[in-house]
Image (spheres, rainbow, N blue to C red):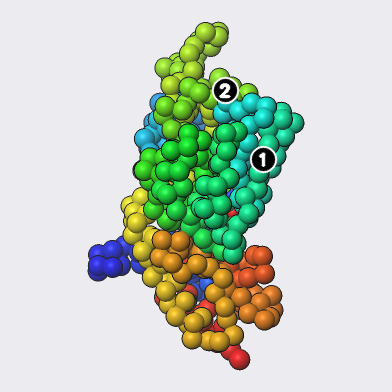
């Protein structure tokens, strides 16, 4: 990392109160919830301050310009166009657009992996009522197996829905290779992006993804209830979502003359958004995405992987620990999971020392973001090395 970038990361760290020395917290848990930064808190505060008086309308030119800007920033993070991005409230929302909006019919088959986070399973299982079959592909050594996937595609297969990064072991799927197979076989490719979006580089066009959805509450460092979905431009007309919103048509910012029931829906992903926006949280998301975009996702990824290199080196040098995550460069992410004989106890002891991590599927899960630095990893390894 060059000196200028190092300074930028230092400055960014200072924006996160969770890193303040006096708190004594070492936060290694963005895969669970991203901590809020000062600019995010300010955006929330400013909004609530303003809404005490409501001197101006909440739906005005400025608000809509901000919404456009945020869609554009979201697009920038995943390599999409702004008109392919819409605001969701969670990962689940975009996955439901896929499950209930794509033209599936009785007898069709949807492929998932048997190690998906439930958010990417239940919306699909709900399709069973319509006679659509959901197949959970067997993972190999707890990772998605591309060969099994390839062999499982049959005449009835219509879609694959998969995580960008697997939540419990941080395995980053090779979306380019998987997307290529989906493209060749003519099946929809849907991605649950939340465990990578904002921290791992991705190009949804290159990966031939049809629908991508991510909550912003983890790696996009935004309040709960925020997120966005991506719908490939050419696909937008194929979707018949059972919900529709009055804000999905173009009022040309004229909200004084509303008895128009004949306005066409937007020709963009915005058409699948749902009603009035939670502005406070959405503007807070803008502040968070500003931090991410100004550092750049590629730089953030290099930063987090470099920090995890230090942890990996330590874990490999101490016989008590076994790394659960893949160490193959293309499958690494900003999550590292490892275990030991008394893993749960170790997790408790970290928590007792204010080192915040998660315990998932029998392993400790450490997740590292842009505000973390070497001293955080040093604190962690210090506790882990206690005999
Ligand atoms: C892979 C994955 N998908 C989805 C979610 C959450 O989904 P939602 O944003 O809809 O609550 C999580 C974690 O909370 C997750 O790890």
Element marked by disc 1: strand
Counting from the top left corner in percent of width and height, residue 262 is at 52, 8
Depth-wise, is mark 2 or mark 1 nearer the camera? 1
Residue situated in front as seen by the camera: 377 or 329: 329
The disc placed on residue 240 is: 2
Q: Which sits in the foreground, 147 or 335?
A: 147
Q: Is residue 82 at least partly visible in the picture? A: yes
Dot 1 beta carbon under 8 Å from ligand 1: no
Query: If the image is split into quadrants, where does the C terminus sit?
Result: bottom right
Badge 2 marks a residue whose secondary structure is loop
Q: Residue at x 36, y 43 (%)?
A: 206
Horizontal side of residue 342 vs 298, given as left or right: right
Few, some or many C-alpha atoms within 10 Å of disc 2 (few <14, some 14-19, many ≥20)? some
Task: State the residue lying farthest toward the bottom.
Answer: 387
User: Residue 282: x and y, percent?
Assistant: 50, 40
Query: Which residue sits at x=25%, y=64%?
Result: 4
Q: Is residue 292 left or right of residue 139?
A: left
Please state the horizontal and vertical placement of residue 94, each as a whole percent of the image.
Answer: 56, 37
Q: Residue at the spot x=57%, y=38% of the render?
A: 154
67 lies left or right of 124: left
Residue at 42 percent of width and 27 percent of height = 234
Task: Judge whether 271 appears above or below 53 on screen.
Answer: above
The quadrant in which the N terminus is found is bottom left
First-in-chain label (2 vs 1): 1
The residue where tag 1 is placed is: 134
Give how far apart the Cα atoms at labels 2 and 1 are.
20 Å
Left or right of 228: which side holds 225?
right
> Can see residue 87?
no
Task: Give x and y (percent) for residue 294.
Answer: 33, 52
Determine whether 138 is above or below 152 in the image. Answer: below
Assess whether mark 1 and mark 2 are in contact (beta carbons under 8 angstroms): no
């Amino acid at each position: 990392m060059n000196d200028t970038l190092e300074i930028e990361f230092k400055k960014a760290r200072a924006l996160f109160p969770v890193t303040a020395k006096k708190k004594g917290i070492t936060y290694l848990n963005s895969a669970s919830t991203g901590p809020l930064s000062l600019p995010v808190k300010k955006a929330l505060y400013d909004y609530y301050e303003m809404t005490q008086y409501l001197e101006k309308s909440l739906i005005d030119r400025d608000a809509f310009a901000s919404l456009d800007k945020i869609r554009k920033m979201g697009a920038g993070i995943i390599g999409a166009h702004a008109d392919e991005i819409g605001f969701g409230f969670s990962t689940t929302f975009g996955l439901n657009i896929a499950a209930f909006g794509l033209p599936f019919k009785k007898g069709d088959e949807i492929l998932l992996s048997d190690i998906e986070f439930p958010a990417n399973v239940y919306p699909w299982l709900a399709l069973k009522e319509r006679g659509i079959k959901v197949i959970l592909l067997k993972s190999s050594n707890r990772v998605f197996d591309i060969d099994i996937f390839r062999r499982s595609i049959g005449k009835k297969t219509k879609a694959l829905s998969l995580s960008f990064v697997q939540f419990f072991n941080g395995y980053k799927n090779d979306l380019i290779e998987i997307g290529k197979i989906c493209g060749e076989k003519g099946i929809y490719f849907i991605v649950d992006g939340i465990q990578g979006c904002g921290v791992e580089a991705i190009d949804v066009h290159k990966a031939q993804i049809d629908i991508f959805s991510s909550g912003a509450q983890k790696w996009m460092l935004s309040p709960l209830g925020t997120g966005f979905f991506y719908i490939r431009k050419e696909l937008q007309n194929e979707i018949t979502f059972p919900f529709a919103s009055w804000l999905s048509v173009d009022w040309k910012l004229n909200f004084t003359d509303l008895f128009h029931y004949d306005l066409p829906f937007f020709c963009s992903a915005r058409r699948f958004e749902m009603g009035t926006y939670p502005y406070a949280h959405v503007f807070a998301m803008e502040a968070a995405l500003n931090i991410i975009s100004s550092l750049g996702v590629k730089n953030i990824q290099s930063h987090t992987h470099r920090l995890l290199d230090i942890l990996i080196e330590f874990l490999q040098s101490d016989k008590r620990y076994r790394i659960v995550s893949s160490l193959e460069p293309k499958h690494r992410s900003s999550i590292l999971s490892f275990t030991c004989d008394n893993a749960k106890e170790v997790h408790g002891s970290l928590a007792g020392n204010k080192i915040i991590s998660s315990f998932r599927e029998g392993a400790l899960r450490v997740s590292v973001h842009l505000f973390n630095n070497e001293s955080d990893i040093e604190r962690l390894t210090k506790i882990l090395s206690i005999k």
